[in-house]
Image (cartoon, rainbow, N blue to C red):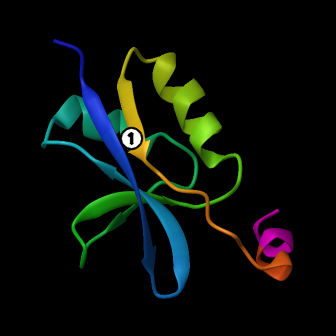
């Protein structure tokens, strides 16, 4: 059975993020940790990455190479202020 991660929009401390939700799996957790800027949010008990306009594409490419299915049906585009985009790059 192929491993699956569910992506969802969220925000933590005014930072727009994409949550990566999956049942605990040590191997999958180690792969998720390898994605750039992926962070464990202890209070929310979830892995997440900062939201950017290209982040879903980058996640899809990274996990496709690892044969992991991403369900991104719950992701919605977020309009970020212009100064936030400059800060992220």
Determine the image quadrant of residue 77.
bottom right
Q: Which residue lies at the image location 24% right of the left edge and 79% below the top edge?
A: 43
58 lies left or right of 43 = right
70 lies left or right of 1 = right
Q: Which residue lies at the image location 47% right of the left edge and 40% below the top edge?
A: 34
What residue span does the magenta drawing correspond to? 85-89
How far across and down, in percent of the image, does residue 60 sit?
54, 30
Q: Secondary structure at mark 1?
A: helix
84 lies left or right of 4 = right
Front residue of 2/38: it is: 2
Vertical arrangement, residue 19 with respect to residue 81, above or below: above
Q: Residue furthest bottom?
A: 13
Determine the image quadrant of residue 15.
bottom right
Vertical arrangement, residue 57 with respect to residue 33, above or below: above
Which corner quadrant holds the N terminus?
A: top left
Main structural element of the magenta stretch: helix, strand or loop? helix
How far across and down, in percent of the image, does residue 40 sit?
34, 62
Q: Which residue lies at the image location 51% right of the left edge and 42% below the top edge?
A: 35
Vertical arrangement, residue 72 with respect to residue 79, above or below: above
């Amino acid at each position: 059975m192929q491993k699956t991660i569910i992506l969802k929009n969220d925000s933590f401390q005014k930072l727009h993020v994409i949550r990566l939700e999956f049942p605990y799996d040590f191997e999958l957790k180690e792969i998720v940790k390898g994605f750039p800027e992926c962070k464990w949010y202890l209070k929310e008990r979830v892995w997440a990455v900062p939201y950017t306009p290209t982040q879903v594409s980058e996640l899809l490419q990274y996990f496709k190479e690892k044969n992991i299915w991403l369900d991104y049906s719950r992701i919605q585009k977020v309009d970020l202020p212009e100064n936030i985009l400059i800060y992220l790059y």
